[in-house]
Image (cartoon, rainbow, N blue to C red):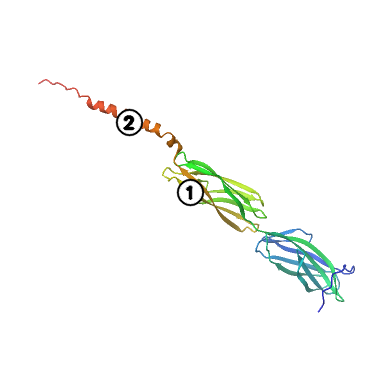
Amino acid sequence: MLSFVPYVRSQSDYDAWFTHIYVTDGNSQIDLIDGGTAKVYRGQEAVMRLTVYNNRDYSDYLYINIYRNGELIVRDSGFSVEPRSSHTEEFSASAWGPTTHSYKVELFYYYWFTAYVIDAKEFEVKVVKLTVSGWSHSTLSIERGFFGTADLTVTFTNGGNDYMYSVSVSVVDSAGLTVTPQTQDLGNINEQATKSAIFSVQAGGDKTPNDYTITFQVAYNDLRGVKHTETFQADVTVKLSNFIMENLGSLILIFVVIGICLVVPIYFLKLRKPKQIKTRN
């Protein structure tokens, strides 16, 4: 069995190299032969397909090492390559995060128990995790009935490390209040960006003065198009109309005056006796 020996400079007469490094990128893959960053969602498997070309006139046995964040995770993975031909090796790595991992792949061969690196490439894999953070809402106290309409503002932040796509905020439980609109589309939200949505809230005239909780759902898609939902709440206080309370005395007086204006004429009409019509026999 060949023993591991620290790598030395490549031999100049060796002729093999990486031609493609395909890495999972969302629902597809990206070639990182010249470096760059692929994206996967947390829990998604990051698959790497490394293609090597042997430019020599005879088959050869080569090896691959893979490092993640400086740690050797694949060692001495050997394979044979036909002359003037390509060969692809596939590896997979668990996508734990959210974070960005640095990868390095090395192509080498052994000669007299010494390993010689003949090609090396570096790239990154970003592990994405999306979440809503910083949910808040404006303080809202509304009067029930005709005067009981006011705006409720909800605000939240994309607490993840990538775009949220096709974001919407919807009412899933209005607590018996009238909330419009029922859904608002907010488009795409970049990582750590904040968005707000304004809803109009109205309390019916028969609504009991009390504290009520409206439930909202934030929906968004990740880079794969997979939908995620999170539920949040906003509190609203319903109270009696200030107009009625502040003008109760005046309203009573108005009703009394109206009553008098209606009752008094009727009373005097009843007191008037109808004229008697005399007839001749």
The image quarter containing residue 254 is top left
Residue 193 visible? The answer is: yes
Element on which disc 1 rests: strand
Give the Cα separation between the discs numbered 2 and 1: 39 Å
Residue at x 56%, y 50% (from the top left corner) = 169
Q: In this view, does 42 lie to the left or right of 276?
A: right
Q: Earlier in the sequence, mark 2 or mark 1?
A: 1
Q: Residue 212: which numbered mark, if any?
A: 1
Most extreme residue toward the bottom is 1
Residue 240 left/right relative to 119? left
For residue 212, above or below residue 266: below
> Where residue 273 sits in the image (x, y, percent)?
20, 24
Residue at 52 percent across and 43 percent down: it is 140
Which numbered tag is attached to residue 203? none
Farthest residue, direction left: 281
Q: Residues within 10 Å of mark 1 (few under 14, many from 20)?
A: some
Q: Quadrant of the C terminus?
A: top left
Q: In this view, does 221 lie above or below 78?
A: above
The answer to whether 277 is drawn above or below residue 120 in the figure is above
Please, what secondary structure does the residue beneath circle 2 have? helix
Residue located 36% across and 32% down the image: 255
Q: Inspect this view and state whether residue 32 appears.
A: no
Residue type at mark 1 is Tyr
Give coordinates of residue 93: x percent, y percent. 70, 67
Residue carrying label 2: 259
